Image: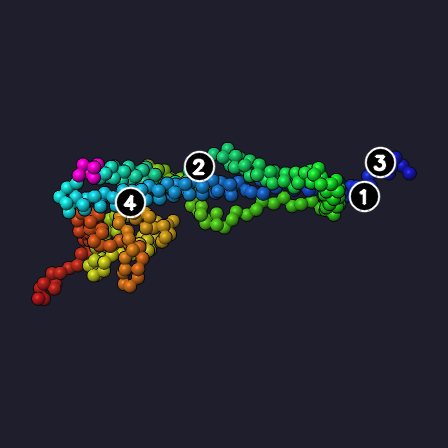
Amino acid sequence: MSDETLNRPAPLISRTANGAGHFAVALAHWAGGHTISEEELLRRIVKARADKHTEAVEEHQREARRAHRKATKLRRIAAEDGGLVPAAQSDLDAAEHTARRHELALVALGDFEIRDVDPGQIRHRRHRIAAARCALLAVPLTGVVVGSWMLDGIVFLLSTGGAVAACCIRGNRPFERTVRPVPAELLADTARLALEPTEDEEEPVEEIETADLGAWRQTLRLFVEHAVAAAHLERKGGVLAGDLLQRLQASGLFLDRTPDAFPAVLRSADIPVKKISVDGVKALGVQYTDLTAALKRLPQLPVHLVPDLTQKTGES
């Protein structure tokens, strides 16, 4: 028998060693967070930013509405009583100041914009995932050590024997190191995210950044005014928010908004929204009388929608 044959490891030992190596590589791949792609990490960072922006907008809208309600109540009391006591007048001034402050905050926040993400943030997020997974892997190992120390050495023997048996069974079959697909919910929430923008796609972004933050509010207010005025002409009390959004999206506007979120957009543009009934359907919408009070004038129709009454006058 040659020396090479004597030095060759037994097939069972070689198989177990190879299996242990495959387990180690697979665990390192999982514990290092490499099963998650950079695209998913990038989208999660953007989604977290969007959620924080939405929370801030909703908070300012809520506080602004609360301040407006308080100021409106005090003005009504002043109109009924012919004035306010000094303390109530101070409360009115404070409410109006608070409302203006939150409205300015909403203007400063504007619409959420997807900005570039620093690669260091992606690495930091992967490191956090790796730390959590390594801590999770340490739990069974700690359990074995504590069990062996507190209970009996048989715990260590059984766990070691089970690990060796698993490595032997795995043998020479390596694990496939894969990257999980991005969840569909995350793709839907970050649909506007362009991972590889082209030169043609970069120009509109610059226009949006330099545009006046209040321009879209003025456009929305004008559109709602015309729609409510046309509805009033048809002897309707107002227009539902869902119908307004449907018309806007038909024109290519507010495509990223849902019917549930659109009333908040209307409120951010200082358009009064409440539950109304139109053609037997009760839902959130804009009422003619509320819009008149907000505009401090009657809603106006565009020239091309003003009905021609000259023919009726001539006939009569």
Q: Residue at x 56, y 42 (%)?
A: 36
Determine whether label 4 and label 3 are within 8 Å by CB: no
- How far apart marks 4 and 1 lie (CA) works out to 77 Å
Tag 2: amino acid:
Asp
- The residue stretch that appears in magenta: 85-90
**Residue tagged 3:** 7
Amino acid type, residue under disc 4 in the picture: Arg
Circle 1 sits on which residue? 11
Q: CA distance from mark 2 to mark 4?
A: 33 Å
Residue 89: say if magenta.
yes
Which SS class for mark 4? helix
Question: Gap between marks 3 and 1, in whole Å?
Answer: 12 Å
Of all residues, the one furthest to the bottom in this rendering is 315
- Give 277 or 18, whichever is nearer the viewer: 277
Residue behind mark 2: 116
Residue 95 location (% of width, % of height): 25, 39
Choose the circle earlier in sequence order: 4 or 1: 1
Say if residue 148 shows up in the picture.
yes
Q: From what the image shows, is residue 238 above or below residue 79?
A: below
Vertical position of residue 86 compared to residue 311: above or below: above
Q: Which picture quadrant has residue 1?
A: top right
**Mark 2 or mark 1: whose residue is earlier in sequence:** 1
Q: Which amino acid, by three-letter code, is at mark 1?
A: Pro
Which residue carries the number 4 mark?
A: 65
